[in-house]
Image: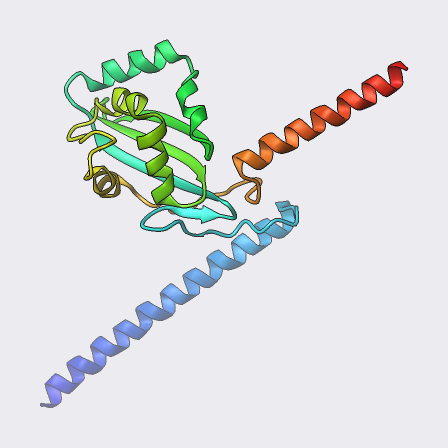
Amino acid sequence: MSSHNNENKHSNSEDLKDKFTESLEAFKLRAELLVANLKEGGDDGYDHSTTTAGEKGLRSGKVSELTVIAPLKEGGAERLKEILKIAGGNLKGATRVGTLHDLRFVFIDDDTRVLFCTAYDGDWDPYIDDFATKIPELMDILFGNVKGWPGIKDPSVKQFILDHQITAAGWYVGVPHLTVQDIRRHERIVKGVNKALDEAQAN
């Protein structure tokens, strides 16, 4: 009994030591980050903190992130690269998804897998629904190169995406309170004001 008690005490002591060490390490990291922010950080008045975007992913203000890593079919990397080369960044159909800020494809693991990242406004479910209703052909052309892709209109597609989605460990949004529509509206206002000023100066 005495030996057993001694073993328990030793184990508890080690646990406390580990927790104390972790605590010190976490304190040190917080202190280093605080000092770096004080030295180098700025204050733009925006709240840049992150929360959950729903099933998976993070949200900062009105903007959310979606990160997916998925295996490619044999020859899928070559086909997808060719599609993206032809598009040259002009995936015009994506403009129809009015909540989309950006998207990008990165080939990893010797082109056997693809990393897909995107930033969008609002909630996860309506964002995926927009892809299915507004640009289904484009989605299937792009993601038809992914192993197991069920098709954007297939009822299982959301679970497929969730199965391959990874929530970002860290994420920063420069202007988290503006949606894509806000940015476009502001641009139209600025253009209108500049035009009015130019016309006033000309008269």
The one nearer the camera, 71 or 155, is 155
Where is residue 85? Give x, y as percent: 36, 11
The one nearer the camera, 67 or 10, is 67
Q: Which quadrant of the rendered structure holds the N terminus?
A: bottom left
Q: Within the image, what quadrant is residue 202 found in? A: top right
**Is residue 79 shown to the viewer in this render?**
yes
Does 101 appear above or below 44?
A: above
Residue projecting furthest to the right: 203
Where is residue 167? Give x, y as percent: 34, 46
**Is residue 168 shown to the viewer in this render?**
no
Which color scheme does this rendered protein use? rainbow
Does 127 appear above or below 14?
A: above
Q: Residue at x 36, y 9 (%)?
A: 86
Q: Residue at x 33, y 31 (%)?
A: 133
Residue projecting furthest to the top: 86
The one nearer the camera, 143 or 70, is 143
Whether residue 97 sits left or right of residue 111 in the image: it is right
Q: How many marks?
A: 0
Whether residue 186 sits left or right of residue 29 in the image: it is right
Q: Residue at x 25, y 38 (%)?
A: 161
The one nearer the camera, 145 or 1, is 145
Residue projecting furthest to the left: 1
Residue projecting furthest to the front: 133
Whether residue 189 sits left or right of residue 71 in the image: it is right
Q: Within the image, what quadrant is residue 164 found in? A: top left
Where is residue 99? Give x, y as percent: 46, 35
Q: Within the image, what quadrant is residue 203 found in? A: top right
Whether residue 166 sits left or right of residue 176 in the image: it is left
Q: Residue at x 24, y 18 (%)?
A: 77
Where is residue 24? Give x, y as percent: 43, 65
